[in-house]
Image (cartoon, helix red, strand yellow):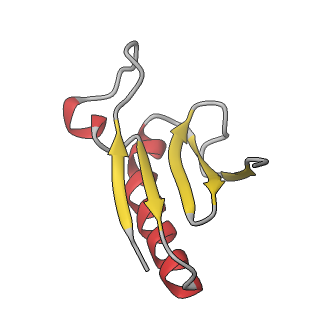
Amino acid sequence: MSQAISTMGPPADSSITAAEELWLAVEVTVGDDKETLDSKLNDAENRLIPIAFRHRCGLLLTQRGAGKYRVEVDPEVPCGITHELKLKL
């Protein structure tokens, strides 16, 4: 079972600080273990919530494939809300 968390940077026109830049999106990859998945996704959300609140944005959780997820600060999601999206594969 593999597990990974990586981060992505902000859009070029963002007003995000350099310290926040590393935490606008978190990629989560896990195997079949539901507890590990829940733990990793909760960790990713908890890392991004302060930044989302600071910029009055919500979070978007996207399932990108089997065991592959992306959690990101999204200005189109209302502040305090996490929307979930499952891409059709």
The answer to which image quadrant residue 57 occupies is top right
Q: Position of residue 45 (x, y in %)?
A: 48, 60
Q: Residue at x 65, y 55 (%)?
A: 63
Q: Residue at x 59, y 44 (%)?
A: 58
67 relative to 84, above or below: below
The answer to which image quadrant residue 69 occupies is bottom right
Question: Which is nearer the eye, 75 or 43?
Answer: 43
71 relative to 67, above or below: above
Q: Position of residue 11 (x, y in %)?
A: 42, 21
Q: Residue at x 55, y 59 (%)?
A: 68
Disc tally is 0
31 relative to 49, above or below: below
The quadrant of the picture occupied by the N terminus is: bottom left
In the image as oriented, which residue stretches furthest toward the top?
13
Question: Which is nearer the eye, 64 or 61?
Answer: 64
Q: Position of residue 12 (x, y in %)?
A: 37, 15
- Left or right: 16 with respect to 52? left
Question: Which is nearer the eye, 49 or 12?
Answer: 12
In the image as oriented, which residue stretches furthest toward the right?
88
Q: Position of residue 29 (x, y in %)?
A: 47, 63
In the image as oriented, which residue stretches furthest toward the left?
19
Q: Residue at x 33, y 28 (%)?
A: 16
- Left or right: 9 with respect to 40? left
24 relative to 32, above or below: above
